[in-house]
Image (cartoon, rainbow, N blue to C red):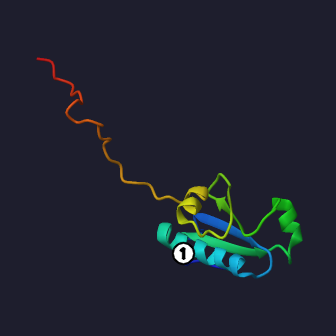
Amino acid sequence: MAKPDSGRGKARFEFCVYIANHTLRSDSAPKRLKKLCEENVPGDYEIEVVDIVKRPDLAKDRQIVATPAVFRTLPAPLRKFIGDLSQKDKTLLGLDLFTPMKSRRPRAKNASRARVPQAAD
């Protein structure tokens, strides 16, 4: 389906969306995945859509029991998510697409009680 032109060669994230026929729910999964990818890894992904009715051999090989099913094949390890991707937070977590937060110092629960090491005289 989508192969954004990143200009850097091979995409860093690869997804395969398995659907059964073209239903509203099945057709929404690739669209939502594309939107999530554009927000979190813009231009660095590739999405393939496979209709398991037309390719039952792939469904058997991947042991697809429900659709839509999304597999993130790259980077390793393989991640799987079943559903139409309507719950953004669960989808990001399931496919491990959270962007890393900027590193910051952890805050003490109670700053007035926090111990500060003293320099030796």
Residue 113 or 51: which is nearer the viewer? 113
Up the image or down, 45 lies above or below 77; here it is below
**Can residue 8 be seen here?**
no
Residue drawn at point x = 76 percent, y = 68 percent: 67
Q: Position of residue 79 (x, y in %)?
A: 66, 56
Rendering quarter of residue 19: bottom right
Rendering quarter of residue 91: bottom right
Kindly give the residue lying farthest to the top in the view shown. Answer: 121
Residue drawn at point x = 24 percent, y = 30 percent: 114
SS at circle 1: helix
Q: Position of residue 62 (x, y in %)?
A: 81, 60
Residue 103 or 108: which is nearer the viewer? 108
Residue drawn at point x = 54 percent, y = 66 percent: 88
Split into 4 quadrants, where in the image is the C terminus? Answer: top left
Amino acid carrying mark 1 in the image:
Lys
Residue drawn at point x = 86 percent, y = 76 percent: 53
Q: Position of residue 32 (x, y in %)?
A: 59, 74
Q: Which residue is mark 1?
A: 35
Q: Position of residue 26 (x, y in %)?
A: 71, 76
In the image, is 44 to the left or to the right of 71? left
Split into 4 quadrants, where in the image is the N terminus? Answer: bottom right
